[in-house]
Image (cartoon, helix red, strand yellow):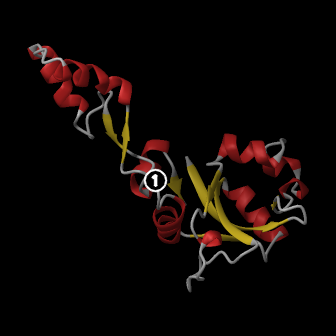
Amino acid sequence: MDLKALKVKISLKDDGGAKYPDFNQMEPAKRGNSDWSQYIDSQGSGWLYDSVGHKDVEARVDEWDSPHGQQWGVILVPQVFADEAVSLFPSECKIIDETKLEKFYDDYHAKDFADEVVDEEALKVFDVKEKYKVALTPEEEAKKTKALDPNDDTAGIKKNHNKKWADFKVKKGYNIV
């Protein structure tokens, strides 16, 4: 799916909730004739938020610094949506290239994601048999080996393909243009 990366400034409303640009001001055809929040989920990535900056005590001195009262987010959207957003909201929206997107994704959005995803239920049978000193069959040993291999598709311990942009974009089929 060919998408543009749109960096968006999210402010705070008086009640403390998030204040997004009102993308519904776009011509309906440029947002798939639907509410913008549904459009970005169905035709793009949904929100990728800075999970770091707006919580920092000390401000970062880079383009992703999200000071108190503001947060950066990125949405991956079709070209027509991105162009219209920048046109309507030039101080809040900016198209960024994939190099900047990767830095944001890896260092700010997914920084605290686990390296691996563990399916405890899938591993429990091996723990129980070990606890009660029940030998695994050769088939179970093979399954356990696969379950402990983060790069194998067998349920158990898996590499978290949401941790790094390079893996996430392949998993989702995204192509940043």
Q: Residue at x 19, y 18 (%)?
A: 129
User: In which quadrant of the rendered image does the C terminus lie?
Assistant: bottom right
Q: Is residue 51 left or right of 78 when viewed as pictured? A: left
Residue type for callout 1: Phe
Q: 122 or 93, which is in the foreground?
A: 122
Dot 1, crowdedness within 10 Å: few (<14), some or many (≥20)?
some
Secondary element type, mark 1:
loop
- Above or below residue 16? Residue 149 is above
Q: Answer yes or no: is residue 7 visible.
A: no
Identify the residue at image location x=68%, y=78%.
Answer: 67
- Estimate the x, y position of residue 174 in percent, counting from the top left: 51, 49
The spot of residue 33 in percent (x, y) is 84, 42
Q: Number of numbered discs present?
A: 1
| Residue 160 left/right relative to 132 | right
Residue sitting at x 63%, y 69%: 55
Which residue: 45% across, 48% down?
Answer: 162
Question: Label 1, on which residue?
Answer: 113
Instruction: Give the image quarter of residue 125.
Output: top left
Is 45 placed above or below 154 here? Answer: below
| Quarter location, residue 14 | bottom right
Image position of 59 with respect to 80: above or below: below
